[in-house]
Amino acid sequence: MSSKPLFPATLEPERYELASPPSWVFESDRRFFFKFLGAGLFIVCTSSKAGAWQESGAIRRNSEDALPQEIDAWLHLGEKGEITVFTGKVEVGQNIRTSLSQAVAEELRVPFDSVRIVMGDTQLVPFDMGTFGSRTTPVMNLQLRRVSAAARDALIAIAAKLWNADPSHLSAADGKVLETGSHRSATYSELVQGQQITQLLPSEDPLIPPAQWTVAGRSLPKVDGRDFVTGAHRYPSDQKLPDMLYGKVVRPAAFNAVLLSADTSEASHLPGVTVVRDGNFLGVAAPSSALAAKAAAAVRATWKSDPQPSSSELFEYLKKNQLPPGDRGEGSRFEAGNVNSVLSAAQSRLQSTYNINYIAHAPLEPRAALAVWDGDRLTVWTGTQRPFGVRLELASAFHIPEQNIRVLMPDTGSAYGGKHTGDAAIEAARLARATKRPVKIVWTREEEFTWAYFRPAGVIEVTSATDPSGKLTAWEFHNYNSGNAGILTYYEVSNQLIEFHPAKSPLRQGSYRGLAATANHFAREVHMDEIAHSLKIDPLEFRVLNLKEERLRSVFTEGARRFGWNGPKPANHGYGVGGGYEKLGYIATFAEVAASRDGSIKILRVLTAFDCGAIVNPDGLRNQIVGANIMGLGGALFETVEFANGRILNDRFSKYRVPRFRDVPPLETLLLDRKDQPPVGAGEAPIVGLAPAISNAIYDATGIRLRSLPLSPLLVPQGRQIS
Amino acid sequence: MGLSTGAHKPEFYKRLTFRSPATLHLGCIAQSLTSTYSFSVWGVCMSTKTSLLINGQARDVEAEPDTSLLSVLREQLDLTGSKYGCGEGQCGACTVLIEGKARRSCITPLWSVVNKSIITIEGLARERHLHPVQQAFLDEDAMQCAYCTSGMIMSAVSLLNSKHNPSDTDILEFMQGNICRCGTYPRILAAIRRAASVAPEPRS
């Protein structure tokens, strides 16, 4: 049994939007923090030099030199028993406010609804690289469990001292410390009354094992759910301040265009309108969004741009425009054995090329920010997965120190990897500085579809060889531009050459749910299917034959059993499977499709078998798995960004099709709860199996092999053709 | 009403903002937000005064007649439960009830709703009692980021107003215009079925 990750977690090169690493700066003085929180118990961490790459807490990258002794407060238990936990992770719909509250309540032994979590407020929370890579559950959940366990132990120690009792006779439950064998008990608030106690997080502290969880491991509903069904919750785009203006950026006519001239006289004469020109930046601020739009339209700007490639020539372009190493991001190369000699001598050899189009995140809440200046101090509310990253962007944009900037992240209307950058924050702050008033910017849908970044397009070439027994003998895999995530194969093969080749991208590109793992799993799992069919071996059997990893075998075989993989089916139906290992989770997705005589395909059902270790919230997990599959339907079947000469052609929902109610086939989830394994994330991995499972099922039903994503812009899951 | 900071704990932030010298400016903001936000009138040339009937109350607004109802709700009346998602009536995030029927407020001009009953998500609950559709969304945990939720709920209320016991096909057809990017459609379907089973009173 293996509990070791197959591959180490690293920062994938295709996170292009993060290209400039944070140049670390000294933390702001946190002594004030203890003042305003008043009395009570604090659980804190100090910085250490341990760890080369740590995403949370006081340690920053590239900080091997002496750091100031920083103190990060993670938990505060106040005199009234109020519990406040601080984390740099943010809520974008993945429901970590709920799952993290469960972790805290579990270890601290308090009611679930007594926990409040402050998220993504750079002034209050410990440094955090950002909420991405499905790292919240493996890293932050563990951290908050440790912090909460330390608080519980500290409270027991306080009671032991107070009562002159043996700590081993004391226990904690329901917000109280109790003594075994006596009626003595004290609430947490009684224990911290009138004191300010600072407790350092111990390096080792036993945690409650998942098998004994009572609050974690349960299906609890979304924290603050009522605020969302009543419209009371304030998303970033809902934020408001007195005297606030509405900003709008005058966008260039094409990507990479240079502003030659701008006639702003008409716009400037509109009542209350300010026009700002700063280099290539051209924006307006007005007392209403309608007037801001009117003013932006009244600006007569001339832009100059060079001819740019279009989506019709995308894949040739990516192959022709590879970047030399180090130019933008790092390529990667993994080699074992001798691929060339095995491939050239092989009896059974297969070569295929897979194409992946750009797709857009299209979060339903577009990028939004509200910025306000007070002298040289800047405060910004914005929807971002990287509040500290946005703070750094603002610091460089305005040449002010990071400690002058506070970024707050209200729970946001989704992101899917698309909200890592601070574009709207910088735009709002620029207009706010010019007008000396608070300014809010909410991107239009067209802006969101054009000026955000896209999931990278890619070309993937795979060549493989097998021996007569059906064992893989060689595996050569080249990914052009799409990215490195999930590029390594989990199938056993002695001779491998796996290479990621960065290329010049016609569009701005960056992280997307699962990153390139979706593309790499698509190519690998479709290719495995192709080999299996060429060898006349059952595709599932062929996978298992070449697989040693026990947990991955389990999701394939358990999923197949539940799906009825070996069961009978009508002649026009097809079964397909795709799966793998991603973001520490094990996934296998099964699909059944039906082909009609008119050439249309209907997806009849999808089953996802998933193992992400010990399950923290089963219902929340199912919600993520089903959501990933539904989102994945779009990229698998019909989503694609069309562009020409520096412009996006399908920049709105009437032109860019996303999955809707009628597109959704029956979706079943099979959760493999591994209480013997640490919990890991689930937001991304479940998206990677769907596209290959559908493509393989279509082949099974029709004999037609689809090797491009989307599989077909005309393919409709529920069997309808669109014209 | 306060600035949402993700923590939903106003006392905490009041202490925070007033005591911390680094954030004194925020303290001022928090203080002024306790009074009703008044919209600065800039005397925009063509704007006219209009009275709207929103959530059972007459509300005065001042805007050009072709301004979208959505921007008036959000900017002038501080009813931010209705969301902007596309501006072309394609995603349903801005859905409100006009005379009991679901309408996309982002493409509804102000002039067209004068003297008509407008219900937004904020007007759906009665006192502390949630509308059955709101309650069903909670019971089914039919949300992730929940940005689409208010539009989904308003559309569902409209459907149930006109059809008390809709089939799954009715629900899917009616809800087709509402987008949830997080992919909670099956839960929303379950929530609407659940709400239908508790027979909501028709509301307009």
Image (cartoon, coloured by chain):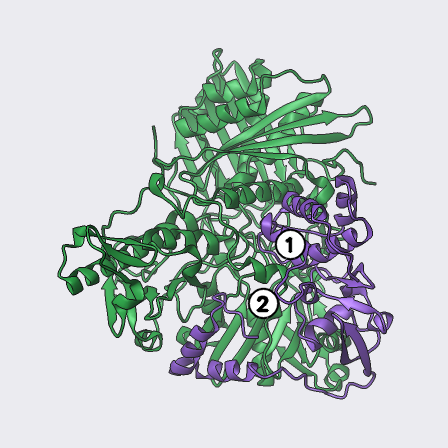
- In the picture of the structure, the residue carrying the numbered disc 2 is A234
Count of picture labels: 2
Q: Residues within 10 Å of mark 1 (few under 14, many from 20)?
A: many
- The reply to whether residue A551 is in sight is yes
Q: Earlier in the sequence, mark 2 or mark 1?
A: 2
Q: Would residue A480 be seen by someone viewing this image from the given angle?
A: no
Q: Position of residue A402 (x, y in %)?
A: 41, 73
The amino acid sitting under disc 2 is Arg
Instruction: Tell me if residue A244 comes above or below residue A507 in the rendering.
Output: below
**Compared to A307, does B64 lie above or below?**
below
Residue denoted by label 1? A362
Q: Chain of mark 1?
A: A
- Picture residue at 72% right of the left edge, 47% below the top: B196
Q: Which chain is green?
A: A
| Picture colour for chain B | purple
SS label for mark 1? loop
Mark 2 crowd level (few <14, some 14–19, many ≥20, 10 Å Cα): many
Secondary structure beneath disc 2?
loop
Q: Amino acid at mark 1?
A: Ala
Q: Quadrant of residue A246?
A: bottom right
Q: Position of residue A13 (x, y in %)?
A: 47, 49
Q: Which residue is more in the foreground, A623 or B59?
A: B59
Residue at the far front: name it. Answer: A183
Most extreme residue toward the top is A468
Q: CA distance from mark 2 to mark 1?
A: 20 Å
Q: Residue at x 27, y 71 (%)?
A: A193
